[in-house]
Image (cartoon, grey):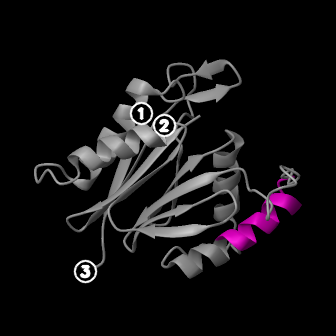
């Protein structure tokens, strides 16, 4: 499980994640896993990933390819990027797309938060893309993170990265699917 947060505040965009991996009833903390980061960097864009642990390796591999489309400037561009990614997930990475017959669309089985100079975004498992004005969280601890960020967002002493980390910290405190350390990055927004 995971908790991923993104925050936009005072000309900055920030992303924070926890570091725990779980498999059924088992958990693997950062103390046991060297590659525990849930953050993928694509150029100057940070992607925080909630989903199967293989997702990070797949996204790193996909976006490292010279012909990979990686445009994260607008909702429409991110949607186009994810549409191509989903096709590659099925064709090249063997995604099992037969999740639930009641779903209108195939699931990519991941939720991703995005922070870059253009803003903060979220991509859902069915490729829905949203741009956020203040903050957002995804993953198993998202409710705890959202409440915590709501409570501190207007504090002028807190930066975007502080708010993002505070959200993940709340999820670690109250969600069994998240654990330390908290990893984060911030980037200056375009004027």
Residue at 88% x, 62% y: name it: 91
Label annotation for residue 141: 2
Would you name the residue on which mark 1 appears?
171
Tell me the CA gap for discs 1 and 2: 5 Å
Residue at 66% x, 51% y: name it: 110
Q: Dot 3: few (<14), some (14–19), or many (≥20) neighbours within 10 Å?
A: few
Q: Position of residue 157 (x, y in %)?
A: 10, 49
* Residue 175 covered by magenta stretch: no
Q: Earlier in the sequence, mark 3 or mark 2?
A: 2
Q: Secondary structure at mark 1?
A: helix
Q: Position of residue 88 (x, y in %)?
A: 80, 64
Front-most of 28 and 145?
145
| Of marks 3 and 1, the one in the foreground | 1
CB under 8 Å between callouts 1 and 2? yes
Residue 3 sits above or below residue 61 on the image: above
Q: Earlier in the sequence, mark 3 or mark 1?
A: 1
Q: Dot 2: few (<14), some (14–19), or many (≥20) neighbours within 10 Å?
A: many
Q: Secondary structure at mark 2?
A: loop
Tell me if 48 is positioned left or right of 163 in this view. Answer: right
Where does the magenta region start and end?
A: 82-94
Tell me if 170 is positioned left or right of 49 in this view. Answer: left
Would you name the residue on which mark 3 appears?
191
The answer to whether residue 183 of the structure is visible from this angle is: no
Residue at 42% x, 33% y: name it: 171
Q: Quadrant of the N terminus?
A: top right
The residue furthest front is 102
């Amino acid at each position: 499980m995971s908790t991923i947060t993104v925050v936009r505040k005072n000309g900055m965009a920030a992303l924070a994640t926890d570091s725990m991996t779980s498999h059924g009833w088992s958990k693997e903390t950062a103390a046991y896993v060297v590659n525990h980061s849930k953050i993928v960097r694509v150029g100057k864009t940070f992607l925080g990933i909630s989903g199967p642990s293989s997702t990070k390796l797949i996204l790193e591999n996909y976006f490292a390819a010279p012909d990979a489309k990686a445009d994260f400037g607008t909702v429409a561009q991110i949607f186009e990027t994810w549409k191509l990614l989903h096709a590659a997930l099925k064709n090249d990475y063997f995604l099992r797309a037969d999740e639930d017959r009641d779903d209108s669309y195939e699931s990519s089985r991941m939720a991703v938060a995005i922070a870059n100079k253009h803003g903060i975004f979220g991509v859902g498992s069915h490729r829905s893309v949203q741009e956020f004005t203040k903050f957002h969280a995804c993953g198993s601890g998202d409710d705890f993170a959202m409440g915590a960020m709501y409570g501190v967002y207007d504090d002028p002493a807190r930066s975007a990265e502080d708010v993002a980390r505070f959200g993940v910290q709340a999820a670690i405190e109250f969600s069994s699917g998240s654990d330390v350390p908290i990893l984060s990055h911030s980037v200056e927004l375009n004027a």
